[in-house]
Amino acid sequence: MYVCTSNTECVSNGVAGVCEAEGFCAFPDPSCESGQRFEPNAGGGLAGECTVACGGVGQACCDNENACTPGASCTAGTCAACVTDIGLGRRFSCALHANGAVWCTGDNAQGQLGVGAAGEPTSTPRQVTDSTSALIADATAIGAGREHACAVRTNGEVWCWGANFGNLAVQIQKTDATPLTGIVEVQAGYFFSCGRDGDGNVWCWGDNGSGQLGDGTVTPRAQAAQVPNLTGIASLTVGALHVCATDGANAVSCWGENGNGQIGDNTTTDAVNPIHVMDSLKVSAGMWHTCGAQGDGTILCWGWSGHGRLGYGKGAQYEGGNELVPVMVIDQSQMAPFGGATAVSAGGQTCAITSDTHVWCWGDDAYGQTGTGVGSVVPVEVTLDDRAPLSGVDRLITHFAHACAHRSDGTFVCWGRNTEGALGDGTLLNRGLATPLTASCP
């Protein structure tokens, strides 16, 4: 029986092993769930047995100083992901941590990092501070727009920072001068924001030049007001200047800017009130376009087809036109509909999750935002930085020229524009392939 005290003592035939907490060496073995197997001379009945998987998100904490893998922390004996949600702005991003803190990185010219002063961009995340000089540490949801971001806090309060709000987060008020409360989801676009409350109502505030506040006017408003005649909303999606909401019966209503047909009502007239578009569609509002996954796994898109965002084989670069009614996304053969989609997410590009948990994207790739290494007018499969297909994805976030995917193991991978440090990886290099999020726990 050989007892070890450090990893340096675990080398066999030139292969480096690990000194496990039990005091015995283990060596790589891909047939084990943990990837490690105890060596034949281990004691305690462990000889030749697989080590117990630990350290990953959702797994038990390991019994050593590196209790969890990077990006996770040990909570009540289980490794939990540091980051639970991400908001993507135009040239910045914000991350919601498991402890309720919000950290932002990237461009800060409009104070969109919420750190008390506007300034140069940074690739190192900074924690957001509110107007009382307190660090935000109780957030439950976040959303980011062109140059501002918002967080839902205790009691469903909403606090926003960046362009038009200032360099510190300020609390959003309703038109009756009382705080907006009860919000469970917040989304943001170009200079406006909308939130969904726990009763299924939608509240919007900010710029309204295209009717994006949904109140029947084009008058901007600094306070939140409920969108009239809209109830029972279960999900909300905000594009550049338009909004779509889906109710509990899967009916989709959209409103706001429609110059490119992104509302989907066969006109280019802005909608200052919600318009019922269609039913049974998992919809996502993007930059001047909208897409939705149907129950049969096909995808419909409408609006501006430039930069290949509609995925129907047309519209490379700036060559696109406006599609006022939905068109079908097609596959790489350009002969048949793209199938197997379970969800779609639209931004400066468009991406979809398929039933095998893989991700496909289409559109311009000037900043690597398709995650495929190429621009394409039809879907192309996203790969990791080692060129293996990205898999295990259960949620997508695509907004502006970058994207992130949440995986079933609790981790995030991101790709796209990073010239201002929006991906928070310590560099200013764009990411053309899906790369693990490097955020660390506080």
Image: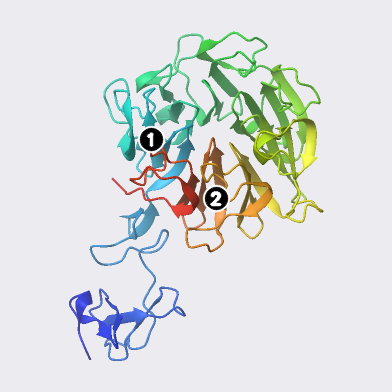
Using residue 37 as the reference point, say whether residue 276 is left or right of it: right
Q: Residue at x 30, y 66 (%)?
A: 62
Using residue 82 as the reference point, say whether residue 400 is left or right of it: right
| Residue 42 at x, y percent in the picture | 28, 87
Q: Tell me how many marks there are.
A: 2
Which element carries disc 1, helix, strand or loop? strand
The amino acid type, in three-letter code, at marker 2 is Gly
Is residue 149 something that shows in the picture? yes
Quarter of the N terminus within the rendering:
bottom left
| Residue 302 at x, y percent in the picture | 74, 34
| Residue 158 at x, y percent in the picture | 44, 25
Which of the two discs, 1 and 2, labels the residue nearer the N terminus?
1
In this rendered view, identify the residue nearer to me: 279 or 374: 374
The amino acid type, in three-letter code, at marker 1 is Gly
Q: Which mark is residue 260?
A: none
Task: State whether residue 159 is above or below residue 352.
Answer: above
Quarter of the C terminus within the rendering:
top left
Q: Are the residues tagged 1 and 2 within 8 Å (C-beta)?
A: no
In this rendered view, identify the residue nearer to me: 107 or 233: 107
Using residue 44 as the reference point, say whether residue 359 is left or right of it: right
Q: Which mark is residue 371?
A: 2
Circle 1 residue? 106
Task: State whether residue 69 is above or below residue 111.
Answer: below
